[in-house]
Image (cartoon, rainbow, N blue to C red):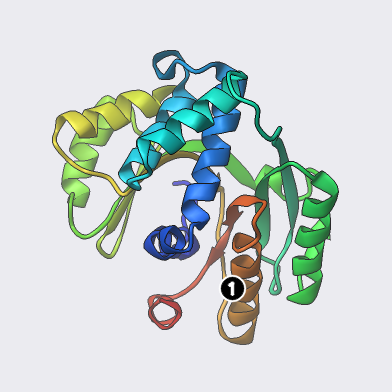
Amino acid sequence: MSGHNKWSTIKHKKGAADAKRGKLFSRLIKEITVAAREGGGDANGNPRLRTALLTAKGANMPKDNIDRAVKRGTGELDGVNYEEIYYEGYAPGGAAVLVEVLTDNKNRAASEVRHAFNKYGGNMGEPGSVAWMFGKKGSIVFEGGVVSEEQAMEIGLEAGAEDIIADGDTVEIHTAIADFEAVKEAFEKAGLEYNAAEITYVPSNNLELEGKSLSSAMKLLDALDDLDDVQKVWSNLDFSDEAAAELE
């Protein structure tokens, strides 16, 4: 079974707060722009763009904002040229950290990411130092009892899902990249509304921390997640249900 951790669950639950301060919209605009630049503006032939557009619509982003982001990506409108970069390192306690950045200034981004690692007791690593601990997968997340584990297994495995993980009222489905669209569409046809559907990185194994190490690691992950150039943060950090309740 692939790895799973409560860090990603907490990040999903912070989505509403991110939207209120404009962070989510900023990230989505960057993702749409880059997706359109790399794969074209036709969502039917560009899975990355299609997923970004669905996420943006689910977040109630205005259509004009979405259209402008697509046109900037295809070159129909002038816009910022974002570069996609990954940084790697370790949080306090040894948890692996993988950071995705979309930036128009890689020197600024590198400096800010390095500063966060140093400030919160982590260590920034060389390319490849922790990436091998993660696999690129499709991820579909349901929260609030929308789908039971049994129902998720019935629909998901039939459509080609690799793994079903139930954690409290959250159910997460992992897929191979090639099967992501088919599995997502199977749940949509069943009338089940997911909270998030994206291509993500899943840890092969988890590291459970507690106490001071957990608190310090979470501070680093939060600091990285709050940086303007950072799109996503992944970690193999895991912790007990009791610790999760305190962190939420």
Rendered residue at 44%/46% (across/down): 1
Rendered residue at 47%/27% (across/down): 49
| Mark 1 lies on residue | 218
Circle 1 residues within 10 Å: few <14, some 14–19, many ≥20:
some
Given residues 166 and 83, the one toward you in this image is: 83
Rendered residue at 56%/50% (across/down): 203
Given residues 106 and 10, the one toward you in this image is: 106
Identify whether 206 is placed above or below 219: above
Rendered residue at 58%/58% (across/down): 236
Q: Where's residue 205, x and y in %?
A: 56, 54
Q: Is residue 176 visible?
A: no
Q: Residue furthest bottom?
A: 212
Identify whether 134 is placed above or below 183: below
Q: Is residue 33 visible?
A: yes
Q: Quadrant of residue 57?
A: top left
Q: Where's residue 54, x and y in %?
A: 35, 35
Given residues 226 and 61, the one toward you in this image is: 61
Q: Quadrant of residue 112?
A: bottom right
In the image: residue 226, left or right of residue 80: left
